[in-house]
Image (cartoon, rainbow, N blue to C red):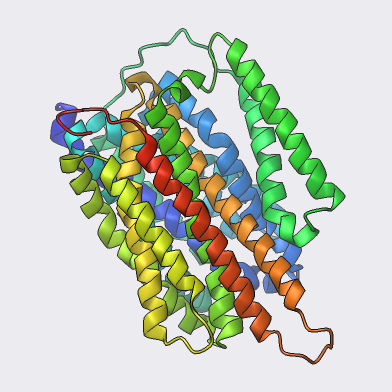
Amino acid sequence: MEEPSNHKWWVLLAIGVGTFMTALDTSVVNTILPLISRTFDSSVADVEWVVTIYLLLLSGLLLSFGRLGDMRGHKAIYLSGFGVFVISSMLCGLAKDVAWLVAFRALQALGAAMLAANSPAILTKNFPPAQRGRALGLQATMTYLGLTVGPSLGGWLASEWGWPIVFYINIPVGLAAFLLSWRAIPNDTVRRPAEKFDLAGATLFLSGLSALLLGLNQGHNWGWGSSPILALLFGSVLLLALFLWVERRSSSPMLDLGLFKHHIFTLTAASAVLNYIGVYSGIFLMPFYLIQGLGLTSAQAGLILTAQPVIMAIIAPISGTLSDRVGTRLPAILGMTILTCGLLLLARLDSGSPQSLIMASLGVVGLGTGMFISPNNSALMGSASRNRQGIAAGILATARNFGMVLGVGLAGAVFTTILAIHQPSGSGGSTQPGLFEAIRVSFIVAAGITFLGVFTSAARERRVINGKD
């Protein structure tokens, strides 16, 4: 095989196809949940576990597979992820009831975690620092394209051939991506074969994070003060605290806590969480505004909502290329500032807002997010040593999922609380004024959180790398 530098664009293509496939699958499954519920005659609560189990295991396993990638080679774990993902996709399509589908989705999350935890590390190792932002930006573009295409493609495929087809399409795409990755990605040089995998730390992290995410995910459904939610949140704190205690004393920790001694790494990870809280607050709230508030159909709402990911897909590689030239700090600050302004614009929408204004406001949110993501990811990956790239990628992906769930949970809590305050006492009263007020307050809260991200992005010290900060 030639030197990795001669293969870097093929590596990017291989990673991009895998990224597109997993993003597509994530967005498609949400679209077909009503069809699955009707096919198996199952309740919405049961069918929701098709999505929930995937999210919990994906988030909880990212660090483990990032660590395994550092120990055994990122390429080996990445290719194994394709195998697991393709097989589990086939099994999902063959599932005979919801219980089996949930089980196969858990297996699919295993493969997705292998892919997500190692793809940024592979890109970082195969691209020089001067091109890292561009490469990570193009990968982000593939994510946004998958999220954009997924709902419409999934809805059309499911209506023509039934819901199993949305899982079967992963088989040819996954096999093609596997062959391309096997050929294009250079083999790893594993430097520390003597290290042992930290099974105790992996188990504690998976248990603690899963309990935390489940509590945040179901809080607005089960009630934030209910016994199950309080038990999950309290238990997660104990498990994660025990995880940190174990990691400090382990000779081969799963999570190298020394990474967080670097202010750039810590602040970029925190900024990523704050960014995704804002973005996914909007993703949760906008369907309520468009469908319940304005009375649009699902198809009309879906078309309007594509304004955000389309702008994100266009801006992410541009911002990544820009950060390679001027440094990562300024684009990240600018991105978080624009995102905050976009959320405040969404907070001003009401029953009389024209669709052009709604799409323009979503476009501002997409502009800010696309401007922020690539530079911030580049800064985080660049601040980790070469033999900790897998862990850094796992932390980056965990920050994304944690911010996503926290954003939905927080927005749901604020939304339902304000809506309950304005709920009319009579059963026949209109809920519209309360709906718009609940959405307005929720967006203001989300904007306040992303405004903190402006300061975390600005607070990291300037470090000169190849002439850039």
Comparing 170 with 52, the one in front is 52
Comparing 275 with 249, the one in front is 275
- In the picture, which quadrant includes the C terminus? top left
Q: Residue furthest bottom?
A: 428
Residue 417, position in %: x, y?
72, 66
Query: Hey, which quadrant is residue 433 in on the image?
Result: bottom right
Residue 5, position in %: x, y?
15, 31
Give the left or right position of residue 159, taking residue 223 as reference: left
The answer to whether any part of residue 369 appears in the image is no
Query: Hey, which quadrant is residue 396 in on the image?
Result: top left
Comparing 405 with 94, the one in front is 405
* Residue at 34% across, 27% down: 383
Placement of 258 over or under 291, stated as above or below = above
Placement of 312 over or under 461, stated as above or below = below
Give the left or right position of residue 10, taking residue 253 as reference: left
* Residue at 47% across, 53% down: 450
- In the picture, which quadrant includes the N terminus? top left
* Residue at 45% across, 28% down: 391
Placement of 371 over or under 267, stated as above or below = below
Residue 332, position in %: x, y?
32, 47
Residue 25, position in %: x, y?
48, 57
What is the count of numbered marks?
Answer: 0
The answer to whether any part of residue 348 appears in the image is yes
Q: Residue furthest right?
A: 227
* Residue at 67% across, 29% down: 240
